[in-house]
Amino acid sequence: MKISEAESIVMEVLWRQHPLAAEEVVAALAEARQWQEATIKTLLNRLLKKGAIVAEKEGRRYLYTPVLRREDWVLEESQGLLEPS
């Protein structure tokens, strides 16, 4: 599964702790990355569409959990570096 560098930063937050609400992901990234809330929510939606994360409705919000395991992603990324272009 191909995820962008920006998406991988969002995934790192979710790999460290999950499930998280969008606001919690925003709080974890907004200060360190200077990203706007809309940018982070867009990245969450992209990851949902790719199947890297799932969202479970809890009341009026969604909780995000990674489906893609960090180990699998790292392995895929490292194999991509070894393959000739």
Image (tube, rainbow, N blue to C red):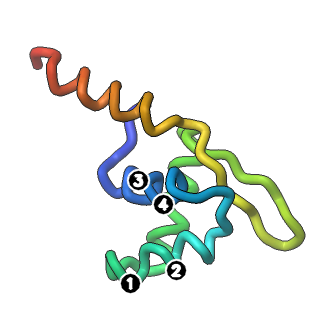
Residue 58, numbered label? none
SS at mark 3 in the image: helix
Query: Closest to the observer: 70 or 60?
Result: 70
Question: Is 83 placed above or below 12 here?
Answer: above
Q: Earlier in the sequence, mark 4 or mark 3?
A: 3
Q: Secondary structure at mark 2?
A: helix
Q: Are marks 1 and 2 in contact (CB under 8 Å)?
A: yes
Which residue matches tag 4? Answer: 13
Q: How many marks?
A: 4
Pointer 2 or 3: first along the chain: 3
Label 2 neighbour load within 10 Å: few <14, some 14-19, many 20+: few
Query: Among all residues in the image, which is located at the extreme left?
Result: 84
Position of residue 68 measured from the top left corner of the image (x, y, whole percent): 53, 36
Mark 1 falls on what kind of element?
helix
C-alpha gap between disc 1 and disc 4: 13 Å
Say the numbered circle drawn on residue 31. Answer: 1
Q: Residue at x 45, y 71 (%)?
A: 39
Q: Is residue 57 above or below residue 79?
A: below
Cα separation between marks 4 and 2: 10 Å
Per the rendering, the mark at residue 27 is 2
Q: Earlier in the sequence, mark 1 or mark 4?
A: 4
Mark 3: few, some, or many residues within 10 Å (few <14, many ≥20)? some
Q: Which residue is mark 3?
A: 7
